[in-house]
Amino acid sequence: MLNYLFRMGDGTMETAAFLLPLAMVLFLGPWVIRELQAMKAGQPVREAHGNVHAPDHTAKAGTPTMGGILLIGAALVYALLFLPLENVRVQCVLLVTVVTAFLGFLDDYAKIKRHNSVGVNGWFKIVLQAIAAAFCAMYLYCTDESVCGILVPFYGFVDIGWLFIPLAVLTIIATSNAVNLTDGLDGLASGCMIPASLFYIVVLPVMQVGSEMFGCEGISLACYAIALLAACVGFLWYNCHPARVFMGDTGSLALGGALGAMAVCTGTELVLIILAGVFVAEASSVMVQVLWFKITRRLCGEGRRFFRMAPLHHHFEKGGMSETQVCVRFWIVSWFLLLIALFACVFYH
């Protein structure tokens, strides 16, 4: 019946994509929060390292984490009920979402059990992300040659052949971890995911970017983007400052994985660099901080820091901005980057 409605194209699937996840998160939110509190799934506060002290977030201690179970769960319930699961690209996006959510759950569980901010080994997460991403990339490459077309901003589609595989793996791993690093303030990651999701909602079915590659596939992925957007909106109701629940790595790794997988399946890997500019900046700040510390330690005998603290949102916090100011300003930047990404596609179209 659901597939029949999908083929009719009467808007039923699109409407359900927004209302079902939103309703699930809003109505189940209080119950999930109570259950997480009962499980003592409190968020460990980040500890100081050396002479660098994290911004004072002691008030957040004990706030339940792993709320991503609700956020991602709502989007997946919609996908399983409404999306054409025989679709190769839908399969890949959902697989990446599930694998990264599972990795995030393991990380959150480890932090809760150990009562500190150290989760599972970072290389373990990256290896499993790489395996899932490589499987999806090769699966797509072997079943649909059109995935090798990549949209170069302000230019058009270019066929990159087998280079699609390493680019896809890099995109999924990088995006998943970038969103994870961004999830450090109340509502920051979920708020920045909303314009990123909106990009695919607008571009795929309306502007028909890559229409030579997509039929109903573009609509299916756009509907999944609607589900993610709706789930983020609902989750933001409980996650805005002061947060009643955190998404944890369960939510942030999965949101990033889903975003990266959608970029891979739509040939918008390079556009994603613009669209996800906030996530890119957050991840880049960590890499620059680590690299600069190692270089200066070797050259000067003492490691120095490029930023006051990384990721970037903590740099601004330590510079005097309030948590709410940082979040809202990062959201504004995210919406501005959405407009640039859309313009890049309009220019081509």
Image (tube, rainbow, N blue to C red):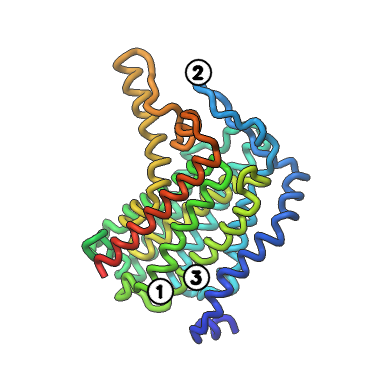
Q: Where is the N terminus found, in terms of image quarters?
A: bottom right
Q: CA distance from mark 3 to mark 1?
A: 9 Å
Q: Where is the C terminus found, in terms of image quarters?
A: bottom left
Front-most of 165 and 16? Answer: 16
* Quarter location, residue 62: top right
Residue 211 drawn above or below residue 34: below
N-terminal-most mark, 1 or 2: 2
Residue type pointed to by label 1: Pro
Residue type pointed to by label 2: Asn
Crowding at dot 1, Cα within 10 Å, few <14 / some 14-19 / many 20+, comes out as many
In the rendered image, which residue does mark 3 sit on? 223
Left/right of residue 59 with respect to residue 277 in the rendered view: right
In the rendered image, which residue does mark 2 sit on? 51
Q: Evaluate if marks 3 and 1 touch, with contact meaning CB atoms under 8 Å apart.
A: no
Left/right of residue 6 with respect to residue 89 in the rendered view: right
Q: Residue at x 72, y 47 (%)?
A: 36
Q: Residue at x 58, y 27 (%)?
A: 47
Residue 319 in view in this figure: yes
Q: CA distance from mark 1 to mark 2?
A: 51 Å
Residue 124 in percent (x, y) is at 49, 41
In the rendered image, which residue does mark 1 sit on? 205
Residue type pointed to by label 3: Cys
Residue 119 in percent (x, y) is at 57, 37
Q: Secondary structure at mark 1?
A: helix
Q: Secondary structure at mark 2?
A: loop
Q: Residue at x 49, y 70 (%)?
A: 223
Front-most of 289 and 119? Answer: 289
Front-most of 137 and 343? Answer: 343
N-terminal-most mark, 3 or 2: 2
